[in-house]
Each structure stands twice: as C-alpha cells, then as structure tokens.
Amino acid sequence: MNIQQAKIFRGDRVIWIVLLLLSLLSLLIVYSSTGALAYRQASGNTLYFLIRQVFFLGAGVGLMLVMVNFFSVKIYAILSNLLIYLSIALLLVAVAMKFTGMADGTGRTLNLGIISFQPAELAKISLIMFTAKVLGKNQQSKAELKKAFFIIMGHTAVVCGLIFITNFSTAALLFATIFTMMYVGRIPFRFLFLVVALGISMVAATYVMAKYIPASPTRVHTVKGRIDRFIYGDPNSEKGITQADYAKLAIYEGGILGKGPGRSDVSNYMAAAYNDFIFAIIVEEYGLIAGIGVMMLYLIFFFRGVIIVRRATRTFPAFLVTGLTMVLVFQAMINIGVSTGILPVTGQPLPWVSLGGTSLIFTSIAFGCVLSVSYQNQVNREIQKPPVQVNVPDEDYEINK
C-alpha cells in the first residue's frame, strides 16, 4: 500500500486486508454457487449475480471510505437515538404488513418501492449504537449502571421482540450481542443472571406454547420445528435431501484440499448454497484448509477489534467497537456452525462473503464504524506524542572550537 492509498484507506490496515481477502473469496464462491440460481432467475446469465456482488461490495467499500475519511465517531452517538426509534418504527411497519397480508414470504423484508431491505439489519446497528451510548454515559456509579441496565433492556426487549416475530435467529444474535456489551460495560452480575434466566424461560415457553399459537403469520412453529429436527433428527434426513445433509456432503467431498474452483456439485441442489450454507461450498471447492483460513480471518478481525477497544480513549467508541465486532463474529460462527451441523439451521449469512444486496451495505456500515474508531485512535496517539527533542549545538562551543 503506497502513501496515497494509505491516506484513503485509513484505519486499521489489518482489517482492510481481511476485508480484501474476504471480498476476493466472496466473488469466487458467489460466481461458483449461483449457477443454478442464474438459470432460475436470470435466464441462465451466470455473470448476473457476480456483477451484482461486485456492485454491492464496491458500494460497501466506498461507504466505508466515506465513513473513515469524512465522518467523526461523535456523529454515531448523536444519531443513535434517532436511528433506534426509526428502526422500531420500520419493524412495526414490517410486522403490520405481515399480519395484514400485505407482505409476502416471511415478512422480514420491507419493500419501499425503489428499495427493499430488512429492517432488522438497521435495527442491529442502531441498537448497538444506542447501547454503546447509554453504557458510555453511565459508568460513574452503581446507580448509573443500574439505570443503564433498565434503559438498555427496555429498548432491547422491544427491538428483539419485534424481530423475533419474523426472524428468531437474528433476534437471538442481537440479544447475545447486547448481553456481551453489558458484561463488558460492568453491569452487575445479578442483573446479567436475571437476563439469562429470562431468555431461557422465554425460549422454553415459546417452544412449549408453539402448538397453541396460530401457524401464521408468526415464525414460532418454524423455530420449534428446527429445534425438534436438531434434537430428534429430521425425518427427511433418512432420504438425504435436507439442506443440512447437502452441506455435510459438500464438506465431506471437499476433503483437505477441495475439488477445485468452480467444481462444486452440491451447490446445484442446495437452495441456499450462496447464502446460509456458503461455508460448506467453500470447503467443497477449496478444502478444509481454506475453511480454517476463513475462520482465521474472522478471528483476526476479532483480535484487531479487541486491540481497537483497548486503545480507545473514550467509552462510547470502545463499547461501539465491542458490539459491532461481536455481532459480526457471532454471525460468522453461526453460519459456520450451521454448515458443519453443530448448530440448528438458521438464516444467517456469512458476513461480507455471502450473496447479498442491502445486507452488504449494512455490514459495510458496521465495518466502517470499527475502522472509524481505529482511525480516531491513531489520530489521538499522534496528538498525545511528546514533541521531538532537537539537540541544537551550543554556539559558543562551536565558535571556541
């Protein structure tokens, strides 16, 4: 990276390298895994989804560059209140459209005509920003920490509750992230224990009461079915036709070194090979070594996030990076866990790798916030450096000499 590029790609260089490697992997694997999808939706044009991915990855990188070069970290704290209530309003609209039959499918996507996106993606970033702001302002006493806890949990209950109606996995992911932020933010352990107990109780109650809840428009029965299939096994597994079976087959066929780029056979039979199960296709084509490499990239990002948090001089940026780093790493681990059969099937894409549209834009906002804080840390270190001492020769000594 030359001097001119360094002036543009500000922030943590290691994270930029991780993003570059993930981008290259994304383009390779999306092109390979969308062949069947191209014949179904793009008249056989196999380049369609590759070009689409290039566009959104490029737009995401452009957005990150704008955030790092022109936005102050303070603006995220200022906008957090507005964004959290905007997110709640959009989630309410999406849920209302689902219940009234105005929305098709799962009700996760809100179609505004010129653009469609998932309000949950905006809600994730908004709630993390809001939580970081509340924690940052209430660190002086136990009374302030208690106040912060109730403010955060009140907003978390609303946001996660609305997301839960149409997307259980995202609600659980966001809830776990907020819990981690409160733990880092020194919220008393007794409150955190209460949160865990309530969370387990709600999941158990949902599972038990699912048979008494109408099958539509909620996703409760889908959640219960996935848990049952994970615990007791899927009857369709005997025929070997489930998505999870295809994912395991892809990993098995990949072996250590893989079958080679573009040689995936399993992706032709999987409905979500380019999204929820993309890690399995990576292993099939590039082998177990590449799969471990992908996990290492996310772990590197995690450790760089820890370093950025430790170098932060203010509380809000530190908590913001904590939340955004954890939500991205959690999401990656869930996607990998689902592909390998460790976790029940969910709908979480692999961050910055899976085929995406507006979801990639929201992911780029998360990365952009982290990079902005890292750049702010660099600026602060430069300001705090002591002035360089210059040894000036003694004139009298020089003359006498």
Image: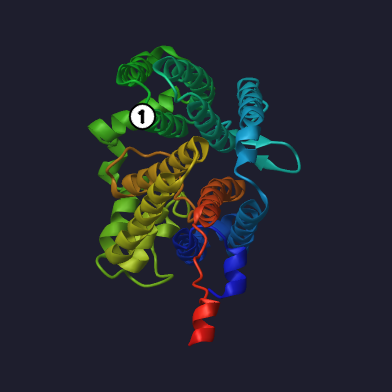
At horizontal 57% and vertical 55% (from top left) the residue drawn is: 40
Residue topped by disc 1:
183
Viewer-nearest residue: 328 or 290 = 328
Viewer-nearest residue: 387 or 25 = 387
Q: Secondary structure at mark 1?
A: helix
* Residue that lies at the very extreme toward the bottom in this rendered image: 401
x%, y% of residue 164?
A: 48, 25
At horizontal 28% and vertical 70% (from top left) the residue drawn is: 257
Alpha-carbon neighbours of circle 1 within 10 Å: few (<14), some, or many (≥20)?
some
- The number of numbered badges drawn on the structure is 1
- Quadrant housing residue 221: top left
Q: Is residue 8 left or right of residue 307?
A: right
x%, y% of residue 374?
A: 50, 52
Q: How is the image coloured?
A: rainbow
260 vs 378: above or below: below
- Quadrant housing residue 325: top left
> What's under tag 1, amino acid-wise?
Tyr
Viewer-nearest residue: 200 or 241 = 200
